[in-house]
Amino acid sequence: MSYFDPLPYAIPIFVLLVGAEIVWMHRGRRNRAYEPRDTAVSLLLGLGSTVAGALTAGAVAMALGLAHGLAPMQIGWAWWAWALCFVLDDLAYYWFHRSAHRVRWFWASHVNHHSSQHYNLSTALRQSWTGFIALAFLFRLPLAAIGFEPGMILTCAAFNLIYQFWIHTEAIDRLPRWFEAVMNTPSHHRVHHGVNARYLDRNYAGTFIVWDRLFGTFQAELSDEPIRYGLVRQLGSFNLLKAAFHEWAAILGDVVRAPWRHKLSYIWREPGWTHDGSRETSAMIRQRQGCERAGSK
Amino acid sequence: MTMAWQLAGSLLAIGLLVLLAWRYGQTGLPALRDEVEARAIADSIAGGFAATSCAIDGNGHGALLRDSNGRIVLVHPHGAQFIARLLGNATVCRREGAMLIVRDGNLSLPLDLAREAKEWEVLLAGPGLAA
């Protein structure tokens, strides 16, 4: 199966924009936006992610092909199919992303995207090495199963990923209201990377923020609550391998130590869940801080 | 072969961007803006932390905070940011005048606490720290 992959064309532009942002933030006396070791980890995670993606691309394409073979109809390559595929792929991304924050198995793969305490364009490239192991591709199979071409799905997914690059910045404040209402923006996505209780587990959108508004997970950025980025329990390390695999190692440790009847729960329940209540989930933190059910505005 | 060239090009680009971040980003120790920031960082530990007292290093490079249960959190630098650590019985400290050097595991942080150094030395030696 061949398809157009725009990512190789986008990567040089990503590099130039990261460089431009470093200089821009320096000129604005915001040197703290970039820290060289953090930048190195982000970029190396991005490079590793492209290698991991190349190694598993065949298996993902095969899975999409098998699902497509079961489709009751063939939608084909019409222009409207591209537009519909992009929108539905973005909906699939929303549910993947929401699951990636609510199911520890998926979170183990996604956590490294959030492990930086910085929020800049290099953070966008801090991508997973273990997305295939976490079965992230499962969320796109329904699109193939209803008749969309696998190549079209992969191209739309790549454009979705490219869209999400530019929203990882503090250099852009707010955009026009109509744009903020429909599209995912730097402001909306800053909230997603926040560890403030009010911002936890909000704004899962990829391209269109409307999914969060529709499913009750939207939170606007508040001018009186500066965002603190990273993880609820900060990684505190610039070790590349630790950044890539720490949550997988933590799951393994928890499963080994847990009583038999709780072992699986450490895999499929939400991050922070413990059988003895010794840690906190995002929902518990939000409740403790009095902001549960106060997310949407 | 193409893949190898792409990999080499990517590594070169990463090296150049890291050099740029080293030149124009933050490389020294960060400074806390104020007590509000120190309290917010301390509150990020599991279960939360409502500080009743706080002492910030003279240069803002760290802070010690204590809650009503006698627990103490150390806010210490990590790169250009800060992270919080709940201190326990394994924590040791040494005072040299106004400087309090706090050691916990692999972490060692000198804090210039001026007149408060002696008071915090006593608190760190007392009961109430996490087991």
Image (spheres, coloured by chain):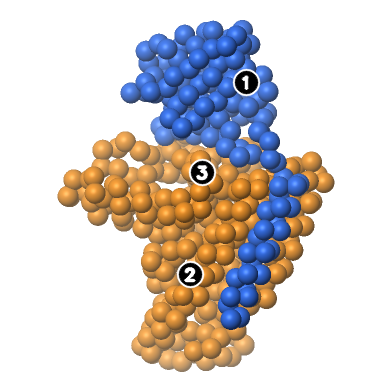
* Residues indicated by labels 3 and 1 sit on the same polypeptide chain: no
User: Label 1: how many residues lie within 10 Å, few (<14), some (14-19) or many (20+)?
Assistant: some
Where is residue A23 drawn, in percent x and y? 78, 51
Q: Which colour is chain A painted?
A: orange
User: Viewer-nearest of labels 3 and 1?
Assistant: 3
Answer left or right for B1 relative to A98: right
Amino acid marked by disc 1: Asp
Q: Residue at x 23, y 45 (%)?
A: A257
Where is residue A80 drawn, in percent x and y? 60, 85
Question: Residue B33 occupies which quadrant of the picture?
Answer: top right
- Estimate the spatial distance between the alpha carbons at disc 1 and disc 2, rounded to whole Å: 44 Å
Answer left or right for A7 relative to A174: left
Amino acid marked by disc 2: Ala
Residue that numbered label 2 is attached to:
A52
- Estimate the spatial distance between the alpha carbons at disc 3 and disc 1, rounded to whole Å: 22 Å
Q: Which residue is drawn at 61% across and 40% down?
A: B79
Subunit that carries the residue with mark 3:
A
